[in-house]
Image: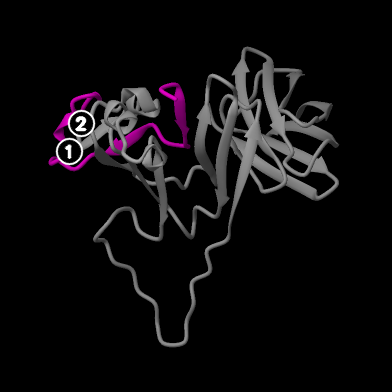
Amino acid sequence: VAETEIVAPIDFVEIPAYWSAIAASEVRTGIPEVHEFDRLRTFGGWDDLGIAYAWPDVRNGDAWGAINQVNGDGIIRVGDSSVTPGLKLWTWGYERSLQADPPEAGPYVEMWAGLTREFFQSTTIGPGEEIRVPETWVVTRGMRGVTDGTRELLFDAALDDLELSLTLFTPAGPEAVAVTASDPLGPLGAAVAQTDQSAMSVVLELDRDPEGPITLTFDQRHGTSSFELHS
């Protein structure tokens, strides 16, 4: 449980001053109450109870959640970060969670999506208007991280020189997924991956150094999805 990792498209968190115990776990930035997001990514790194907010938000991706790095099982929320840009993280603290009474009350990592960045920030809705919050919770197996995805496909990406390593997971079951990589100048590489009940890995050998962001396109039986990767 201590190795459970919070996976989210963020590098920084805002920790209100009154949660000083967890704030002390992270490196401060030059912005008041904003810290690097490092030790608190892992459940075992929470020395006490507290709240941390994604900073500035989670608009860099639509998928976030938690993965047990011991057995590779996880649960990932896929939503629309333009609708819910906020992410609140809360735990009772790892050691305190182990003392929960009754035991089923803990331990856990609490993650909330929000229409605003944090508690006590208001938003508005007019008479007769509605705000729809589309979201899907995906149970994963074999993923060690999540870069982004849709309800039909989650992926983790890492670029090392001209090798683009991808881990793919298709919640609906095994299927063939065609993957292409391109940049503003044109194609970089392509491959076909056959997914399984667990996550599968594929390596794209790029033809040249990317110029600018890489666009990944996935063609599968549910349709086509594209994502932009930045170094």
> Residue visible at 85% across and 46% down?
221
The residue under the point 51% across, 41% down is: 64
Q: Is residue 215 visible?
A: yes
* 169, above or below 221, in the image: above
Q: Is residue 69 magenta?
A: no
Q: Residues within 10 Å of mark 1 (few under 14, many from 20)?
A: some
Q: Which residue is mark 2?
A: 23
Asked if residue 186 can be seen in this view, the reply is no
> The residue tagged with tag 1: helix, strand or loop?
loop
Q: Does the residue at mark 1 contact the one at mark 2 (Cβ under 8 Å)?
A: yes
**Is residue 162 left or right of 75 when viewed as pictured?**
right
Q: Position of residue 114 (x, y in %)?
A: 40, 56
Q: Nearer the viewer, residue 48 or 56?
A: 48
Segment colored magenta: 1-29
Three-letter residue code for mark 2: Ala
Q: Is residue 43 above or below residue 171?
A: above
Q: Would you say 54 lies left or right of 70 here? A: left
